[in-house]
Amino acid sequence: MIEITEEMKKGFTTKNPETFILRNQYGAERLYEVLFTFQNPEMTKHYIIFTDNTFAHHRVKRIFAGTYDPDAESIQPIPLQSDEEWEMAKKLLDSLWGNPTLGPETA
């Protein structure tokens, strides 16, 4: 189980208003905004939390999470691979913002 540490919270980088574009399986482009990034020292991965600024049911903003390569030329999120990573992302968001809805990236 991954614990959310104060060190991880201190490592958050808010990139405002950094954006990136992803294409879905049909070739349609969608603009995403980076909410924040962080590194998990236990997993030696870099994570990104982002949104397309659309709303799901009950006016809840859609928020996505993934891993990414901070040295890459452009942001290309990779979907989270394990339940453990999803739990970590949900706990981080909950500790920062209350109880946001987090779903798999569906660009």
Image (cartoon, rainbow, N blue to C red):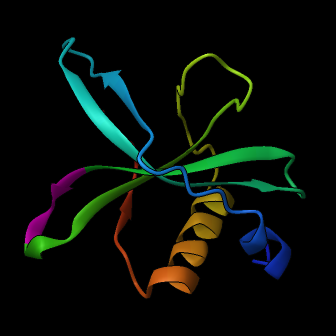
Compared across the picture, whether 39 is left or right of 16 comes to right
**Quarter containing the N terminus:** bottom right
Q: Compared to 95, does 30 lie above or below?
A: above
- The spot of residue 95 in percent (x, y) is 58, 85
Decide whether residue 41 is among the magenta residues: no
List the single residue furthest toward the front. Answer: 16
The magenta segment: 53-57
The residue sitting at 72% across, 73% down in the picture is 9
Residue 106 visible in the snapshot: no
Decide which of 9, 102 is in the foreground and name it.
Answer: 9
- The spot of residue 42 in percent (x, y) is 90, 58
Main SS, magenta residues: strand
Q: Quadrant of residue 73?
A: top right
Q: How many numbered badges does the structure rendering display?
A: 0
Q: Compared to 27, does 83 lie above or below?
A: below
The residue sitting at 11% across, 72% down in the picture is 59
The residue sitting at 27% across, 22% down in the picture is 24
- The spot of residue 66 in percent (x, y) is 55, 44
Residue 5 visible in the snapshot: yes
**Quarter containing the C terminus:** top left
Decide which of 73, 91 is in the foreground and name it.
Answer: 73
Compared across the picture, whether 62 is left or right of 19 comes to left
Decide which of 47, 11 is in the foreground and name it.
Answer: 11
Q: Quadrant of residue 13?
A: bottom right
- The spot of residue 83 in percent (x, y) is 61, 59
Compared across the picture, whether 1 is left or right of 69 comes to right
List the single residue furthest toward the left. Answer: 58
Decide which of 97, 4 is in the foreground and name it.
Answer: 97
